[in-house]
Amino acid sequence: MASEYQPDSLDLLNHQGSVQQKLEYLLENLQQTYPFICRIAIAIYDALQDQLKTFAVAGVGHPLLEHYQTALHDVASLQQMKDNQFIRVINDIGGELGGGESPTQHTKALLKAGFHASYTFPMRYNERFLGFVFFNGAEKDCFQGRALVDMDMIGHMITLIVYNERSNIRTLIATVKSAMLLTHSRDPETGGHLERMARYSRLIAARLASKHGFSDEYVEHICLFAPLHDLGKIKVPDSILLKPGRLEEEELDEMRRHPMYGHELVDALIDNYGLNGVSHVNMLRNIVLYHHETLDGAGYPEHLRGEQIPIESRIVSVADVFDALTSARPYKPAWSNDKAFAELKRLAGAKLDKECVLALMDCRKHIEEIQQRFRENEYG
C-alpha cells in the first residue's frame, strides 16, 4: 500500500517570492523547534558607500530599525566580524554592555523590545561580503548546543536566498547597463549621474516609506532600478539623440517614444533571461515607462495625471530632474543646490510630486555626501 508523501516543510523557498516573504516563512518553521527565536533580520552591505542598510525582517509587530543605514566602519564589532569572518553569539545582551561599552542604536532597540540574546551571521558568497543575518531570542542563554548548529545552517540558507535574489537582479542590471554603454557614448548623461540619481531616489523613498508603507526591500529596489530609467534611448537614432540644435516636432515625437522602447526591452530581457521571479519587477517596468509623466498630464507617453503615475516613477522623476539641474552639461553649467531646490519647488504640484520634492529637500546633508562621493571629473 502506497504511503502518503509529506511535502518538504521548506518547499516554499523554491518558489517565486520576495526575500521578505521567504524570511517570514523560514522564521515560522524555525519557531516550531526554537520558539524563543522572535526575530530574523537582514542588513545588506553597499561597498561603494561602506553602508550597512536594513533590508528585510521577520518577527515582532514592527521592524525595530526601519529604513536605517549606517557606515559599517562606525560599528566596530560588525566591522571586525566582516574582516575576520567570525560569527558572534551574545547570550545576554544587557550583560555584554556591563563592561562600559556604549550601546548602539540597534542594541538599545533590541533591549527595549525585550530581546536578551542574539546570533549574528556574516553573509559571504564566493568571497564577497553581502551583509549580516541577525537572529534574536527572547530568553538569555538560548543560543547553545544544537541551536548553534541550526542557526549556522539557516544563516547559510538565507545567504543563498539573498545572493540568488541579488544575482538575478545583477544579471538584469548588468545586461541593461552593458546595452546602455552604447548610449553613454552618445548621450550627455554620465555614469556619475546614474549613481547619484539612484541614491537620491533611495533618499526620497526612505523618507516616504512610513506614509506609503514601503518596506526596506522596496526602498532598496528603487535604488537598484532607478539608473535603468532611460534604457529606451538605445533605440533612438543618433541623428536625434546627438542633434546639437532644437528638435523638430517629428524628432521630438521619436525621442518621446524612448519610455515605450525601454518598456519593450525590459520585457524582452526578463523573458530571455528567465527573470520573471525577480522581486518588484513591475517597479522596474513603471520606472522605465512613466518617468517622464507629469502631474498635470502634459508628460508622456500616456499623459497620466497625479496619482495615476506610480509612486516609484514620481520618485525617480524628482531625483532625475534634480541631478540634471545640478550637473554640468555641454549646453549649461551646473546649478547650485539652492537654485535647483528653488526650481523643484516651482515645479512641485504642477509637474513634480510635491511630497517627493520636499522629501529630497529634507536630505541636504546626505545629498552633499552623495555629490562628493560621485562627483564628476573630466572623464564623466
Image (cartoon, rainbow, N blue to C red):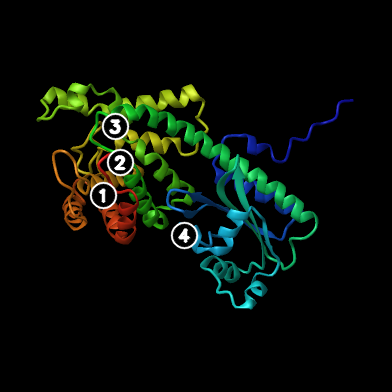
Give the alpha-carbon distance from disc 2 to disc 3, as whole Å.
27 Å
Q: Is residue 260 visible?
A: no
Element type at marker 1? Answer: loop
Q: Earlier in the sequence, mark 2 or mark 1?
A: 2
The answer to whether residue 328 is above or below residue 262 is below
The image position of residue 47, as x and y in percent, is: 47, 49
Q: Bin the neighbour count of mark 3 within 10 Å (Cα to Cα): few under 14, some 14-19, many 20 and up.
A: some
**Which label belongs to residue 353?**
1
Q: Can residue 212 be seen?
A: yes
Q: Amino acid at mark 3?
A: His
4 vs 2, front mark: 4
- Badge 2 amino acid: Ile
Disc 4/disc 1 C-alpha distance (Å): 28 Å
Question: At 65% from the left edge and 72% from the top edge, which residue is drawn?
Answer: 96
Q: Are marks 4 and 3 in contact (CB under 8 Å)?
A: no
Q: Nearer the viewer, mark 4 or mark 1?
A: 4
Q: Earlier in the sequence, mark 2 or mark 3?
A: 3
Residue lying at 59% horizontally and 59% vertically, measured from the top left? 80
